């Protein structure tokens, strides 16, 4: 038996031999998948003979017949209580691998080899190596944070759920507690970011009756036939939100003719592909287009464009009078593109497209045969690839991603396709999707895509409300990004402003009165109307019902650096159990869970008694006739004798059912004058 060590990821010894042995390197916080496949490729060819431990796991039967339930099932009040019960049911079906320090992996066992591929990076602290690890089952669509369609009774169509494949991940109980704490209250994110590495039965040898979204072979190079199939499906089956139309404005644009490799004016009704990438300060040298020496990402995009049978690529970035004009029509350029190639991986223009360029090769996919069935490892989902990608930190790429209808994303591990109706990837077989879970609901998608304004805009009021909500979402994302040149701050947002202008003013922008200021009603011709009051809760924008706001702070005055206000001042006891629970001091009366600022974790506050100033209270219902719920928006403050300083913003999610309890009403109904410095 030749052992594979999970700590140093080398062969020839056990984990217990590696611990404390200076001859072996320390564990890496990130698995090197290239090194893994290179290592396994050097081993003798594996057979389908399992080691004794893996025989007892009966992995093929487990992936075929195990009763694995849906972990995202929302109750009528909006909670995931049914899904939580299913999660506990599934936990009883985890297969134990033992404490990390004693897990033995046999290099000749195909299941051991697959476990080695998908095993998460081990803890850096050797003291944590007594933690038990398990094979954990998850329904294929749950890993994508998707839910089943609902019946007329409002219940998930479970008969469809049982038709989806089962994926296997490796977790410890401690890993799950960490994920639960980080994404507490968000059932989709708990699944979306908790299963980066998994394996499943191949679509070539699927389990009977469980074929939905099985694992698919993903080659070392991008698959042209799969990509053409996605685009063909989009053109053939998808709604008008995916339709690409021509605009005469495009005639002023400059394109690359990919056949002649020349810069040309946009031909009449040209079908073209746009390119979105991270510039990174690398520009083409003179004559690079003619000599085929453009930065690698652009060269690869030309090859993909030609392979798809498209004539032109929109990428001209050289300074010109036309470029200034094009900045004002970025929405038209990307919205009218037949598709947009997104270079998701890489820090600059020379990184290349993974799977196209020899500069940026893709890690091989792991494959093993057990009892005549093929097992494949799956690659990170699109959301997982987006997390941490340089592309998602750059200002220019935001409007390029949002304004197009079809996106071909070349990620580090695989190609993804996202249109305004669906999303797909190379390593998941999307030909069998019984519940159509890959179709995007843009109202509730975990990917932010521009809403289809045609569904919302019925009159001027709804048009204004739509523009307000969309603009706020765009600005929030845009201001979280960076740019190389500060002078681009407006240019990189012009396309989105043009998009909103067309939504708000389909007949054209109002006439300007230049002798008066633009911020005043006297500076414009036309009817003036005002939006709702600005409040922290963004009332009406969250899909909730019967939203009202009260307990709002009253402004009384300011003197020097002292602000005087009137509001509800609460003293709460914070206990970490393990999350920040708020209690009435000196009692065991739980008010709810606290969340500080924008932290994902709900355990960032210290324990103890603190003063909180209520900014406002949001009352709402998750459904029209559902129970009333409360959320308090507060400021954690320090100080005494009526003079305080701001420490942090905090939300308090009041426990269901407390809305009418005297103890809760007693602590939230008293106002006092407070001075803030």
Image (tube, rainbow, N blue to C red):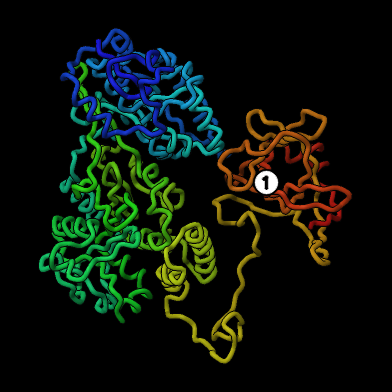
Residue 91 % position (x, y): 46, 20
Image height of 302 relative to 109, above or below: below
Q: Report whether 60 appears left or right of 137.
A: left
Q: Residue at x 54, y 51 (%)?
A: 543
Residue bearing mark 1? 650
Identify the image quadrant of the C terminus: bottom right
> In the orientation shown, which residue stands out farthest toward the right?
641
Q: How many marks?
A: 1
Q: Residues within 10 Å of mark 1 (few under 14, many from 20)?
A: many
Q: Quadrant of residue 65?
A: top left
Q: In front here: 242 or 152?
A: 242
Q: Quadrant of residue 562?
A: bottom right
Q: Residue at x 76, y 46 (%)?
A: 612
Secondary structure beneath label 1? strand
Let me know if residue 500 appears in the view. Answer: no
Closer to us: 285 or 382: 285
* Residue 169 visible, this angle: yes
Q: Residue furthest bottom?
A: 515
Find the residue positioned furthest to the front. Answer: 22
Residue 569 screen position, x and y as percent: 81, 48
In this view, the residue in front, 530 or 150, is: 530
Q: Where is residue 123 shown, x and y percent of the image?
A: 46, 26
Expressed as whole percent of the image width and height from the top left, the position of residue 589 reads 77, 31
Quadrant in which the N terminus is drawn:
top left
Residue sitting at 31 percent across and 81 percent down? 321
Closest to the observer: 637 or 76? 637
Residue extending farthest to the left is 260
């Amino acid at each position: 038996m030749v052992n594979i060590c999970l700590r140093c990821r080398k062969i020839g010894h056990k984990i217990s031999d590696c611990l404390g042995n200076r001859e072996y390197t320390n564990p890496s916080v990130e698995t090197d998948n290239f090194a893994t496949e290179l290592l396994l490729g050097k081993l003798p060819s594996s057979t389908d003979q399992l080691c004794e431990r893996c025989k007892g796991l009966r992995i093929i039967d487990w992936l075929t017949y195990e009763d694995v339930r849906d972990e995202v099932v929302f109750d009528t009040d909006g909670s995931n209580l049914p899904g939580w019960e299913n999660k506990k049911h599934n936990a009883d079906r985890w297969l134990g691998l033992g404490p990390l320090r004693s897990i033995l992996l046999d290099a000749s066992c195909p299941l051991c080899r697959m476990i080695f591929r998908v095993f998460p990076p081990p803890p850096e602290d050797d003291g944590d190596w007594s933690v038990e690890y398990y094979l954990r089952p998850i329904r294929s669509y749950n890993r994508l944070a998707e839910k089943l369609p609902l019946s007329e009774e409002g219940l998930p169509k479970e008969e469809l759920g049982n038709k989806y494949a089962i994926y296997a991940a490796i977790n410890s109980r401690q890993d799950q507690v960490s994920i639960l704490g980080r994404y507490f209250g968000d059932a989709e994110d708990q699944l979306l970011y908790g299963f980066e590495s998994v394996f499943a039965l191949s679509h070539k040898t699927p389990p009977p009756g469980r074929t939905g979204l099985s694992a698919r072979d993903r080659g070392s190079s991008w698959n042209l036939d799969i990509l053409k199939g996605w685009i063909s499906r989009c053109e053939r089956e998808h709604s008008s939100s995916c339709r690409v139309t021509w605009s005469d404005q495009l005639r002023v644009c400059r394109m690359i003719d990919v056949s002649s490799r020349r810069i040309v004016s946009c031909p009449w009704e040209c079908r073209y592909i746009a390119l979105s990438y991270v510039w990174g300060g690398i520009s083409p040298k003179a004559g690079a287009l003619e000599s085929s020496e453009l930065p690698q990402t652009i060269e690869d995009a030309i090859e993909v464009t030609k392979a798809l049978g498209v004539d032109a690529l929109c990428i001209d970035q050289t300074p010109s009078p036309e470029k200034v004009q094009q900045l004002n029509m970025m929405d038209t350029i990307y919205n009218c593109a037949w598709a947009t190639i997104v270079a998701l991986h890489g820090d600059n223009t020379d990184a290349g497209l993974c799977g196209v360029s020899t500069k940026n090769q893709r890690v091989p996919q792991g494959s093993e045969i057990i009892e005549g069935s093929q097992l494949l490892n799956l690659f990170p989902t699109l959301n997982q690839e987006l997390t941490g990608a340089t592309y998602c930190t750059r200002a220019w790429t935001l409007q390029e991603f949002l304004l197009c209808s079809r996106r071909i994303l070349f990620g580090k591990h695989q190609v993804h396709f996202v249109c305004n109706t669906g999303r797909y990837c190379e390593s998941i077989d999307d030909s069998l999707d019984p519940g159509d879970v890959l179709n995007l609901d843009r109202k509730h998608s975990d990917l932010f895509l521009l809403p289809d304004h045609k569904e919302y805009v019925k009159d001027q009021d709804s048009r204004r409300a739509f523009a307000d909500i969309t603009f706020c979402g765009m600005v929030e994302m845009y201001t979280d990004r960076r740019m190389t040149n500060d002078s681009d701050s407006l240019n990189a947002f012009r396309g989105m402003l043009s998009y909103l202008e067309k939504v708000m003013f389909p007949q054209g922008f109002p006439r300007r009165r230049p002798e008066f200021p633009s911020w005043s009603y006297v500076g414009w011709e036309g009817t003036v109307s005002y939006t709702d009051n600005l409040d922290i809760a963004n009332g009406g924008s969250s899909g909730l019902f019967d939203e009202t706001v009260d307990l709002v702070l009253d402004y009384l005055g300011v003197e020097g650096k002292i602000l005087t206000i009137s509001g509800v001042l609460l003293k709460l006891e914070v206990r970490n159990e393990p999350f920040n629970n708020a209690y009435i001091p000196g009692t065991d009366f739980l008010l709810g869970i606290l969340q500080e600022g924008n932290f994902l974790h709900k355990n960032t506050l210290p324990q103890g008694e603190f003063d909180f100033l209520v900014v406002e209270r949001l009352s709402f219902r998750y459904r029209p006739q559902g129970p009333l719920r409360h959320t308090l928006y507060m400021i954690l403050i320090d100080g005494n004798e009526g003079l305080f300083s701001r420490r942090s913003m905090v939300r308090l999610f009041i426990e269901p059912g407390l809305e009418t309890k005297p103890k809760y009403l007693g602590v939230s109904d008293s106002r006092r004058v407070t001075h803030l410095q």
